[in-house]
Amino acid sequence: MSNKFLVHFQTVDPLLYSLFNKYSLPEIKQENPKKYFSQLCGEIIGQQLSGKVADVICARFEMLFPGKRVTPVGVLNLSEEKLRLTGMSWSKVSFIRDLAQQILTKSIQLDQLARLSDMEVIATLTKVKGIGPWTADMFLMFTLGR
């Protein structure tokens, strides 16, 4: 755990600070910005699904791309029907295509997200159809490590 993190809690929450010192906690990992698009697609796919079902659909989705490298261009080059055959609903297909389009038009710049505040990340991501505050929060926690 980083010193900056511990110093913060030493100041604002001495009880949590003492627990952090007593127990070994796992490091919070931040994903590579090159994986942000894929992570967001996974968050969209996983909405309102069990973990196992989401994993199956995500695996099928990744198989559509050479080397399982999910890209905005790759998504837009696939037909909606082909994306739908992974098991995604039509709405999730449109959400993922909207995300890809916004990235390609630079309405959303994924490589800038890590520099933004939490509120700015939420405001940016919720511009995409199908990404609400909950999905943005999941991205903050599990991809940006916040």
Image (cartoon, rainbow, N blue to C red):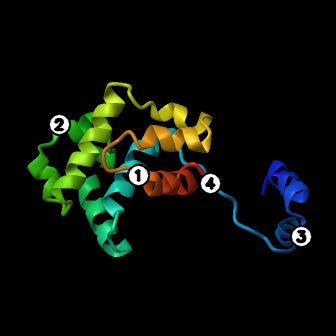
* Residue sitting at the far left: 81
Q: Which mark is residue 68?
A: none
Identified at 78% across, 57% down, the residue is 1
Q: Quadrant of residue 55?
A: bottom left
User: Which residue matches tag 4?
Assistant: 29
Q: Earlier in the sequence, mark 2 or mark 1?
A: 2
User: Which residue matches tag 1?
Assistant: 132
Residue 118, given in percent of the width and then of the height, sits at 60, 44
Q: Mark 4 belongs to which amino acid?
A: Lys
Is residue 117 shown left or right of residue 67?
Answer: right
User: Which residue matches tag 2?
Assistant: 77
Q: Secondary structure at mark 3?
A: helix
Residue 30, given in percent of the width and then of the height, sits at 60, 49
Residue 7, given in percent of the width and then of the height, sits at 88, 52
Eye-nearest disc, 3 or 4: 3
* Residue sitting at the far top: 105
Q: Secondary structure at mark 1?
A: loop
